[in-house]
Image (cartoon, rainbow, N blue to C red):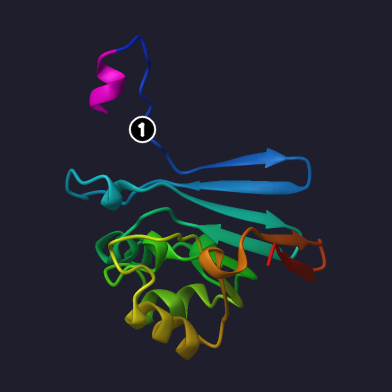
Amino acid sequence: MKALQGVDATFTKASNQTVNLGSVKLRVIAPPPGMPDDQNLNSVGLAVQFGEFRALLTGDSESPETEGWMAQERADLRGPFQVYKSIHHGAANGDTVGWLASVRPQNVVISVGQNSYGHPTDSALRLYRQSGARVYRTDRQGTVTFQGRADGTYTADTDR
């Protein structure tokens, strides 16, 4: 925000909306009301749907934000999702048992590289295993690519 204030830029707060791109629906998931002024707690999510294939990406959200989304009882955030990008690189303050039970991911992709934060944490990895999801890690498998089909089937490919 500070960087945008110093240049000729227009800031638009995210709002819940659906963008139709042919047969693909992109649902913008705005932060729930009442989030404190914290970058992670104001992450914007994106739910992608192509027929029966669904993917969910929720940025660096933390548990207060996901609790707010669950309280809204949003159908677009209830699984199953074939692909789910882990919240906050697998941080301990991200995913919870309740959130993963709602999202019901089949595959979790952890976008992570070498870091001093300890991401992904053992607690997050344990949650993903307990949910029954297959886990992909970009630090170990490189780029992870899913190709979804309208019938809900998909293929997954990795660099390594």
- Residue 31 in the image: x percent, y percent? 34, 48
Residue at horizontal 20 percent and vertical 50 percent from the top? 34
Looking at the figure, which quarter contains the C terminus? bottom right
- Rate crowding at label 1 as few (under 14), some (14 to 19) or many (20 or more) other CA atoms within 10 Å: few
Residue projecting furthest to the left = 36
Q: Is residue 154 left or right of residue 113?
A: right
> Magenta part mainly helix, strand or loop?
helix
Q: Which amino acid does label 1 sit on?
A: Lys
Looking at the figure, which quarter contains the N terminus? top left
Q: Is residue 51 left or right of residue 28?
A: right
- Residue 43 in the image: x percent, y percent? 36, 48
Residue interval drawn in magenta:
1-6
Say which quarter of the image contains residue 15.
top left
Residue at horizontal 31 percent and vertical 21 percent from the top? 4
User: Residue 90 lies in magenta, yes or no?
Assistant: no
Residue at horizontal 55 percent and vertical 88 percent from the top? 132
Residue 29 visible (yes or no) = yes
The residue under label 1 is 13
- Residue 146 in the image: x percent, y percent? 71, 62
